Amino acid sequence: MDLTKSRPKLDDFLKTLNQYISSLPATKPKHILELYSKNNKSIPPFPQDVCPSMSGDWDIFHYSAPSSIKLIGSYILQLQVKPKSNIDLAIELPLECYTRRDYLDYRWALKNALYLSHLATQITKWDSILSVHFFYLNNNTLKPAIVLRAKNHPKIDIRLLPHPPNELFKLTKLLPYENCVRHNLDSLSSPNPTPLYNNSLLSTLFYEQHLHSIFTAMELCPAIRDAVLLVKEWLRRRNLEDGWGGFSGFLGTMLLTYLLSCRNVSNGMSEFQIFRVFILTLASSNWTEEPISLFPEGQEPPIDPGSFTPFYPVTFVDTSGYVNLAGDLSLAQYSRVRHEAQISLSQLDSSRAFDLLFHTCVPFLDSFDCVIRIEELHSILSHIKDTVTTGEVPEIGSQLLPTVIYRMLKILEKGLGDKVRIISHTALYYDPWGIDTHPPVVPHPDQLSLGFIYTGSEMFSGQIIGPPLSDPVSVVFSELWGDKVEMRRFPDGAVCPVVVWPCSNPSESRIIPFLITRHLLATHMGVCPDKVTFPGMQLDQLLHISDQSSIGPEIPLSTGETSSSRVQDLFGELTQKLFALKHLPLRISSVQGTHAVFRGCHVFPPSLAPSGRALLALKSEGDDPSFLLPNADLSTPRYTPALTAVLNLAISGKWPDELEAIWRVKTAFYLELYHQLKKQLILSLPTRFFLDVFFHGFVFRFQVSYFREVQYLQNYPGPLDLTVQLNARASELLFETKTLPTYTARVHGLILKYSSLSAAIRLTKRWIHSQMFSTLIPDVIIEMLVLYVYLNSELFTSPGHHVTAFLRFLSLLSLHSWETEPIIINPSNQISEEDIKEIRIQFPKLRHTLPPLFLVSPWDKESKITASTPSLPVLNRLTILARQTYKYLSSFLIPQIGSTPLVDIKALFRPPLNDFDVIIRIRLKFAPRALYAVDPLVVPPVQESKQRKVMNMPVVEFDPVEKFVKELRSRFEKIALFFVDEWGGREVGVVWQPSYQLTDRFRVNQCGGKRYKQDSQLMDVNLHSVLNDFRMIGGDMIEDIISNSK
Amino acid sequence: MSSNKVGDYYIIDVMFKYDLPSDPHSLYCKVHTDHSDKKELPDGKTLFVAGLPFYMKKESVTGIFNSLGAISYLHISKSLGGLNLKVSTKSSKDPYFSILLPNSDGFIYAYVVFVNEISLECIEELSRNSIESPISCTIVKQIGINSWIEEYKDERPEIEQLQTQVKRFMTKYDARRQTEENTVKKRRNIPDEDGWITVTGKNNKKVPKHNLSKIRLRKVTKKKKKNELLHFYKFQMREEKRDNILQLQKKFDEDKKKITAMKLQRKFKPL
């Protein structure tokens, strides 16, 4: 934040503020209770649930001017980072406000609160003040303070931080193992240490000393200043400093001074070198067990840093030797900071290091595989308050939040074990509140989101096996899991307690950590299971065909991986049968699947064809197989995809050398296969170009590949327009028979490696299709972009859950600059380093000749696949949609303050229809895939003749909606763009081409769909005639044509 | 200029199944003049029609224009450059080439040749009448779902039929190869007029060279541009140039704005 311009003015203001506060008159001494309960204009910012005992000699309080007001913090050090702009003023309360024993029983906190409340009422009277609020410093309820805004500087927070005089209390009484909260103890029990309470008081006493140590460090090594800015920016991009328990910028600054003091950083280092040391130290640090200390060497510290560790999750001792600077840092945040540091460390040497470390935001949601929401935090807090005893963490009065979170994490750590690498939580805030209202009791929002990063990318096993019963540790195990424990006898005779989770398919396996969390929190923290949710799970319903009656969102839906593998198994079986065929003119050397289902990427893997439950379709050899035909008058039969595969034959020199003859030979081969399969009672149908085989209810489509066909296609003699078409066909054929099989095999391998990849690809495809981009963005391109998310997760670990992958895909789409950066997919480094370098160098030079989306992969180094699709307008629209979807989805997963929560997750999958100029709605009976739609409709089943002896080949790949759009596109590509969702969409969106909408002079080649306007003597659009042309093609299919006239 | 004319073209309004009289389709026709003396399209008798929707067949076109007089010849072309009338090659008959989808445009062109030259003189009257009350037109061509079902059926011929077709072709092919081989064989040891013997190797399959097709393709793209008739007249060229310059200027201004905007919203501003 550039304050240099406004600095003189600000300084003037601060001076007058100082004078104003110092000149406030003192008040008469009054009893504290009187002050506290008096219905003042301002309510003292003191937590209501704590009430110190009102006895003794300390209960008289009066206001008098502070003994000193000093500027501290980043403003005076000029270390502020945008967009936060705080000016911190340390206000030292006069000595006479306290007694020497006020460090006990919240007395100092109460007095601070009373002081602040008086100060606040006085300041509001000053007319150059815009607003006055209370807030908790570092969200610590024991450190209330005032934040005010001046009328002349409305964007700058001026914070008044009260603190007792430094020399007032005996510091040794506040060491971590001391107890300072005594009032509600019965005399019998031994007093528990109150380390967090002690530290809260201590940290307010040393504001000035800390400022001084940073200042000296900056004097010593000027580059530290820039390094601090880098560190703060790094923290900010990762939201690490936010809220309760965050890793504050101040802590980062102190760590840098520590590095300087222990000579890890030398005076001559540059800021980036210092930053590197910072990241390195953080990544390898273990402050939980090996605390660090700023206390100068050679002197005797008041207490050994090591003795802090039992009392605090994280320890970093300051220069005085008393304060734990990391006292407010929560264990979860610390482990996340360390994790981020480790990831950043691996990116420090990358060519995009600066971009990745300081430009790219790392949102909480994108980093975690599973984000679980716990609602109604206050009920947990009150539950804990009742049950708080001497436990794992020392009891610390009103500070329940740290206790709750510490406990929660400890239990989860035990329960989740090695399934989860990092557990963290979202930032919790106490919002600043008005001076006339009561301080907030629970942080806002009243919920917590826990984030897990899974350890591996494999599936979790559903069983957790405890130690054998003979082992005394097994009691601990049973205690941890409560009523979930079952006893099982294992083959080796041991009887072990076992906890079993449902785990029949990958989607169930991925949510096991969630189920564990819910169970453990219910057992140990009294959290109602309804309040623990995993919002991301609701996305699963989009991959689920709701054929069955509706299922509640809590039950994991099958996301289709199992049906994919079923089809693959059947395909394997059929392949074996093909290999076993004898007497073929040429041996089949290999069969390679090319359909998306063979790489687990088909959005809805086909289920059985309706009539195809029979194992063998033919009853006897003599049966004459036939095939069903669609009928224009009946509703279209259920959609059966043809699962394409390529047949590679043994190499032979006997192929003819003419294109026509090659084609006939292939057909002859299909005919031969047909006869052979018929003998095995397998129904098949040969055509000129392929052989459809009906096997176990699925239709597999085989095509023979002959490697020279491409060359013959390219060199066929004939008229020129034929050559053009043949060449187009040649590259298509090359892609189908060469690129696609290898690609399919590769992706299949990757899917086995990353268990969530299949679901991620299919969810992403679903989303893109649902935005009506079918065929405008080819499926393979979507698959490759998701692969990119998995293989290039620079700032993350590879996604463990498909929702995380989907989120990262959305942010890739919305943030990637397609104009300047190529996307390079490089699984197992198949493209060499030099090639990548070359691509990066050549890319900007050739940018204008390359397609809008440039995608390099080992199987397609020139991005041929994106050459014609997607077009630039489509890509731009996709980017915009991705940005919005990301916004809404993230507010669905973690509700954000100020944004309206999304109630129905499906809304993200409903396209905005009013963006289109015209909507053509298709009748349900012509939409065979309507049951896959986001809001599915059941198509009335087709009447089939019952008296059929022989099974017929079902209608394959026949979707009138698809054909309709295809025809519209080929006929009217100059006039309009057509959008459709092939997965059940019944609307066709039409957008007029801008070039068509221009009124222009008459041109013979562009007169179609236009009308001559007499008055302007120009050609104007004739939308009605074009719409009627659409109607001519659609005929009965069209239910309605709606134009969104503007 | 009369109301029913744009340039040399007369406007004829027609109505199809779904059209209302207020929003008809417009056809544009002009007396055809061709300098390359094609016998099929004689000057003075031929009418060139543009803007026909693709589903119009010969019957429908005749239905509109036979009120002018008897029609001796009608040609429908899918593209503007469709003057070369002899497009039927052997490949267009081969069902295997159906895999190549023809570039089908939504609007087609027609050449109507009348028996008498007088017919063309009545075109203006027809045009004027049609604007007052559009000519309604019926369609017999199968389009939409019926045509797709037809396609689906065509894709799956009867198996026996397919078998015989393939067999017939292959026997013919083999026979042709055989004769070719035989002629080569015959020539092998017989000296020609000068007493030379042509030495031929064994019939090694040679796949034609790759670059040939590339050259052809380049020609095609060139020709395609030519066909579009964009830079035909001088004024077209002039306007094109002017438009270009204007567009460049516009783009330059936009780029400048973009750059300033980009400068303003620099991402990294810690201070």
Image (spheres, rainbow, N blue to C red):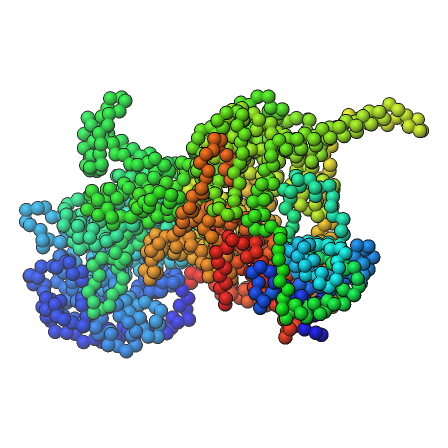
Q: Find the residue positioned furthest to the bottom.
A: A127
Residue reaching furthest to the right: B194
A364, above or below A583, in the image: below
Q: Nearer the viewer, residue A894 or A997?
A: A997
Residue positioned 50% across, 55% down in the render? A1038
User: Where residue B152 sits: x, y (%)?
Assistant: 57, 42
Toward which corner of the image does residue A1012 lie, by quadrant? bottom right
Count of marks overlaid on the render: 0
Residue A352 in the image: state x and y as whole percent.
Answer: 49, 50
Would you place residue B91 above or below residue A923 in this image? above
Rendered location of residue B197, percent (x, y): 88, 26
Relative horizontal placement of residue A697, taking residue A190 as reference (left or right)? right
Residue A673 place in picture, x, y as percent:
58, 28
Residue toward you, A674 or A257: A674
Frontmost residue, A463 versus A474:
A463
Q: Examine the rendering and report whether any part of residue A592 can be seen.
A: no
Image quarter hosting the N terminus of chain A: bottom left
Location of residue B69 with respect to A664 vertically, above or below: below
Name the residue located 24 percent from the left edge and 48 percent from the top edge: A530
Residue occupying image coordinates x 40% and y 49%:
A936
